[in-house]
Amino acid sequence: MSIWDYANPKKFIATTTPLVPWFFGLAGVSLVVGLIWGFFFTPDDFRQGSTVKIIYLHVPSALMAINAWLMMLVASLIWLIRRHHVSALAAKAAAPVGIAMTLIALFTGAIWGEPMWGTWWAWDPRLTSFLILFLFYLGYVALWQAISDPDTAADLTSILCMVGSVFALLSRYAVNFWNQGLHQGASLSLDKEENVADVFYQPLLLCIAGFVLLFLALVLLRTRTEIGRRRIRALEMRARRQEVRA
Amino acid sequence: MIALIARDLRLAIRAGGGFGLGLAFFLIVIVLVPFGVGPEALQLREIAPGILWVAALLSALLSLDRIFALDYEDGSLQLLATAPLPLESVSLAKAVSHWITAGLPLVIAGPALGFLLNLAPAAYPWLILSLLIGTPALSLIGTFGAALTVGLRRGGLLLSLLVLPLYVPTLIFGAEVARRGGEGLAVQGPLLLLAGVTMGTVALMPFAAAMVLKVNLR
């Protein structure tokens, strides 16, 4: 049994339907525990005070904003190469979730930046590239909405996603060149000896897990909705054809 | 391919409108800026390279939807798709003719409008050079955007939403070359990166544009 069996919409729905409530439940539990742990049971930072705690929303949402685009890229490639409709619909379903994640990251960053940097917004490379990522998401969603034929829309948005990924990466490093920023370095990376101090690290990991699960649950749910919408469209077209015949 | 470019150029010149309109738009944006930010010469000098680049980018954007729309409406794009010339070459030819009609005039007019914004004297050669190197990338990216939205009835606004984020790297490097040139700093880095962006778009965008054209002509 290969992973491509799930490209069958029926099989996809049958498999994912029981999973979605679990994902939602686990996401809820890890977010509630992680946020309460992070907000009430970790010490304040000695320089940033209690504002440091916004990290529990900011870092996971920023992480997911980028990963959502990556997921869309992979799904788009699968659609272009293997023509699995579920894949194209999953990419479509992930985009608004990605927009929400980008907005959460931008807003929490602004709320944190106001007391810490003394400004809601600075044209810092990281902030700027996130704003550009937001624009890419908007263009992607707008293109989906503008085209009525689903297959054409899937093709065009997939190609836009590919081209956009190249330019998003290019912009990411171009803005680095353009302005050295205020934003601190990466909070988390796999190859560093120590990331954030351990007291903050554990609830942060829990929150990240919560965001990943929430993203999965939302995308699966939305993909199911899209499949349903596609079926309604097919039924309506069939009904119309029968009307014409009768 | 050359015949196609020549045909597009003839059409652009004889049909009128598109050719001068972009330039007029460029001029108007430049004229409006001092009304917005005030007439202080030093302040204008500081923002001049950036404003010139942003205005060039906007006026290049203005004529993008004409690249394929007319050919799509009268069916000649269908004929081009079935012609022995590959669609990739058609996209490249379209980008070249868009650059000659919309990009090259900007390169020529840019320095003239630099006077209006009190551009630093040292910046002129770098502004011309950066526009010369950077505007082809604008045309090539724009051709891709125009190909994406060619089948849509009201694609104009969507086109700008799709294309403008793609213009970011070109704008950053282009304006940086002009700014550094004006301040007498080393320009080699951004200049090479700008050329890299243009070369990358020359190599890749015709293929992406042909891909979406094939989808749109299905």
Image (spheres, rainbow, N blue to C red):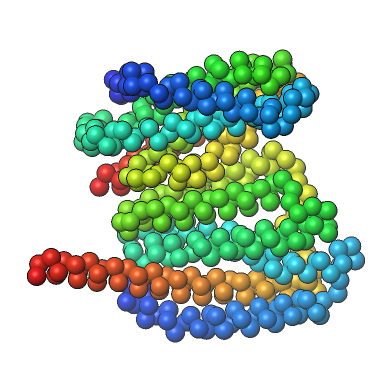
Quarter containing the N terminus of chain A: bottom left
Q: Which of the pair B39/B114 is nearer the observer?
A: B39
Most extreme residue toward the right is A46
x, y percentage for residue B48? Answer: 69, 26
x, y percentage for residue A61? Answer: 64, 65
Q: Quadrant of residue B118?
A: top right
| Residue shown at the point (70%, 82%) measured from the top left | A33
Regarding residue B143, the answer to whether it shows in the image is yes
Is residue A36 placed above or below A83 in the rendered structure? below
x, y percentage for residue A28? Answer: 61, 81
Is B118 on the left-hand or right-hand side of B205?
Answer: right
Is B162 on the left-hand or right-hand side of B30?
Answer: left
Is residue A225 placed above or below B54 in the rendered structure? below
Q: How many marks?
A: 0
| Residue shown at the point (78%, 66%) measured from the top left | A196
Is residue B111 placed above or below A70 in the rendered structure? above
Quarter containing the C terminus of chain A: bottom left
| Residue shown at the point (58%, 58%) measured from the top left | A66
Q: Which of the pair B16/B75 is nearer the observer?
A: B16
Most extreme residue toward the left is A246
